């Protein structure tokens, strides 16, 4: 899996506690897929820093994002619209079929603004 990596995260080892907004036990596990730039690195830091957040993996291309998501079964997927090795809309559809309970946040390039340049 050359395009993705698991993130060793201490947040995933936090004691489970009830999240007031989500009404669930334990951390919210997520996988992020996007081009490596300031926006995505910041997204990882912000989500991992939340009391109930836990970023399990990051990928900068579609194929490994799909593999990581199937393997880790995250609660949340954050996807860039411009992913190499996989159409992001098709990837979203495939992941929704495989992980029907997961929430998918699709981030269009226009939202990246000055924080990231996708190519």
Image (cartoon, rainbow, N blue to C red):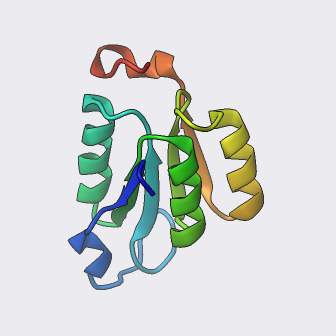
Camera sees residue 20? no
Percent x, y of residue 10: 22, 73
Q: Quadrant of the C terminus?
A: top left
Residue 47 appears in the picture as rendered: yes
Q: Is residue 97 left or right of residue 11?
A: right
Q: Is residue 108 above or below residue 36?
A: above
Q: Residue at x 68, y 63 (%)?
A: 99
Vertically, is 37 above or below 47?
above
Q: Where does residue 76 sit, x and y in percent of width and height?
A: 52, 57
Residue sitting at x 56%, y 29%: 81
Residue depicted at 44% across the width and 66% down the height: 29
Q: Quadrant of the N terminus?
A: bottom left
In the image: residue 36, left or right of residue 108: left
Quarter-of-image position of residue 62: top right
In this view, the residue in front, 3 or 92, is 3
Q: Total marks drawn?
A: 0
**Picture coordinates of residue 70, whole percent (x, y):** 60, 66
Residue at the limit of the structure toward the front, as seen here: 2
> Which residue is nearer to you in this view: 18 or 2?
2
Side (left or right) of 114 relative to 97: left
Q: Residue at x 73, y 63 (%)?
A: 98
Image height check: is 112 above or below 76? above
Q: Position of residue 4 (x, y in %)?
A: 41, 53
């Amino acid at each position: 899996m050359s395009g993705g990596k698991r993130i060793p995260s201490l947040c995933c080892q936090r004691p489970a506690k009830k999240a007031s907004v989500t009404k669930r036990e334990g951390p919210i596990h997520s996988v992020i897929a996007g081009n490596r730039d300031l926006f995505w690195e910041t997204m990882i830091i912000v989500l991992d820093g939340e009391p109930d957040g836990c970023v399990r993996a990051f990928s900068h291309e579609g194929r490994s994002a799909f593999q990581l998501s199937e393997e880790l079964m995250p609660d949340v997927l954050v996807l860039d619209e411009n992913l190499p090795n996989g159409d992001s809309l098709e990837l979203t559809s495939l992941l929704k079929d495989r992980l029907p309970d997961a929430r998918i946040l699709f981030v269009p390039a226009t939202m990246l603004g000055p924080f990231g340049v996708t190519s």
